[in-house]
Amino acid sequence: MPTRYLPHAKAKEEFAQLPPHIREEFLYAIRGLLFQPYRPGPGYRVKERTDHPGLWRLRLSSFRRVRMYYSVDGNTLRVYGFGPREGFYARLRQTDRLRR
């Protein structure tokens, strides 16, 4: 179970660009992930990426087109990015955020 949250530098920038009400929902979801990182919670769903094992997608129930990608590394919840679904995974690869 992760005990801390570590966002990538680009993820911090993307998070700051989100509207305040969406940021609040993501913060709520992140708190839930610290207790159960691989299970859905109220207001969000999670799913492991089949093309990249160990990388998880979080989708908010009320804002279905906005995603967060994360992984769990020991006791650390690593967040790689926030953004709209369209082309998001390609943007993660282009900025080389997925290198561990």
Image (cartoon, rainbow, N blue to C red):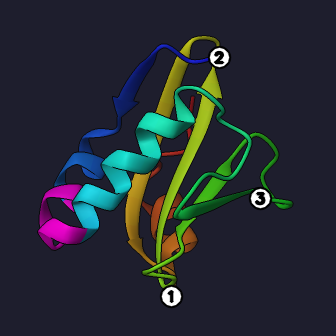
Give the spatial CA distance, label 1 vs label 3.
15 Å
Q: Which mark is residue 49?
A: 3
Give the spatial CA distance, label 3 vs label 2.
19 Å
Badge 2 crowding class, 10 Å Cα cut-off, few under 14, some 14 to 19, many 20 or more, is some
**Front disc: 2 or 1:** 2
Q: Label 1, on which residue?
A: 86
**Residue 68: image x %, image y %?**
48, 59
SS at circle 3: loop
Residue 8 visible (yes or no): yes
SS at circle 2: loop
- Residue lying at 24% horizontally and 57% vertically, measured from the top left: 24
Mark found first going from the N terminus, 1 or 3:
3
**Residue 17: image x %, image y %?**
14, 67
**Relative horizontal placement of residue 95, taking residue 92 as reference (left or right):** left
Give the spatial CA distance, label 2 vs label 1.
30 Å
Q: Which mark is residue 1?
A: 2
Q: Which image quadrant for residue 39?
A: top right
Q: Is residue 8 above or below residue 69?
A: above
**Amino acid carrying mark 3 in the image:** Arg
Q: Is residue 87 above or below residue 26?
A: below
Q: Which mark is residue 22?
A: none
**Residue 9: image x %, image y %?**
25, 40
**Residue 85: image x %, image y %?**
51, 81
Q: Main secondary structure of the magenta part?
A: helix
